Amino acid sequence: MNTGKIIADLREQMVWSQTDLANKSDVSRVMIGKYERGEASPSIEAAKKIADAFDVSLDYLVCEGQNAKFDKKTQEDSGSGTARGR
């Protein structure tokens, strides 16, 4: 699954418009549309802002890494949350 599809799916699950996500993530609505259509890929900074808005890990959003299957809540519950390395 690509990042744009994950963004669109998460946004639909939250019942947010692209404008809602743009306001919550401080990423422009135009760019969110481009990500969802696969016309552009988010920068690391934009992806982090979007992941934070959805309260998911960056790994989850880009579907990579050992935590790609978990949202932040699941990670925290299992003890492998983002607090590691602090």
Image: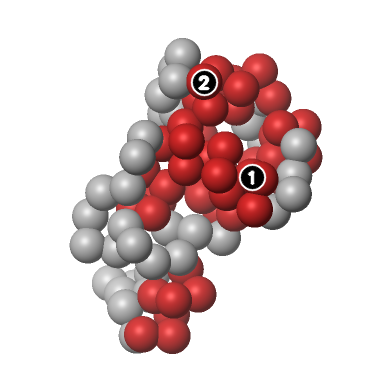
Disc 2 crowd rating (10 Å Cα; few below 14, some 14-19, many 20+) is few
Location of the N terminus by quadrant is top left
**Above or below for 71 versus 50:** below
**Above or below for 12 versus 82:** above
Identify the secondary structure beneath mark 2: helix
**Residue 31 showing in the rendered view:** yes
| Residue in the foreground of this view, choosing between 74 and 76 | 74
Q: Earlier in the sequence, mark 1 or mark 2?
A: 1
| Residue 45 coordinates in the image, percent (x, y) | 46, 36
Task: Identify the residue under disc 1.
Answer: 11
Q: Three-letter amino acid code at disc 2?
A: Arg
In the figure, residue 70 lies in which quadrant? bottom left
Count of picture labels: 2
Q: Hey, which residue is sitting farthest top in the picture?
A: 39
Location of the C terminus by quadrant is bottom left
The tag on residue 66 is: none
For the point 41% across and 36% down, the residue is 3
The tag on residue 37 is: 2
Q: Hey, which residue is sitting farthest left in the picture?
A: 66
| Residue in the foreground of this view, choosing between 76 and 14 | 14
For the point 76% across and 37% down, the residue is 17
Q: Is residue 77 left or right of residue 49?
A: left
Q: Three-letter amino acid code at disc 1?
A: Arg
| Residue 18 coordinates in the image, percent (x, y) | 71, 32
| Residue 52 coordinates in the image, percent (x, y) | 56, 53
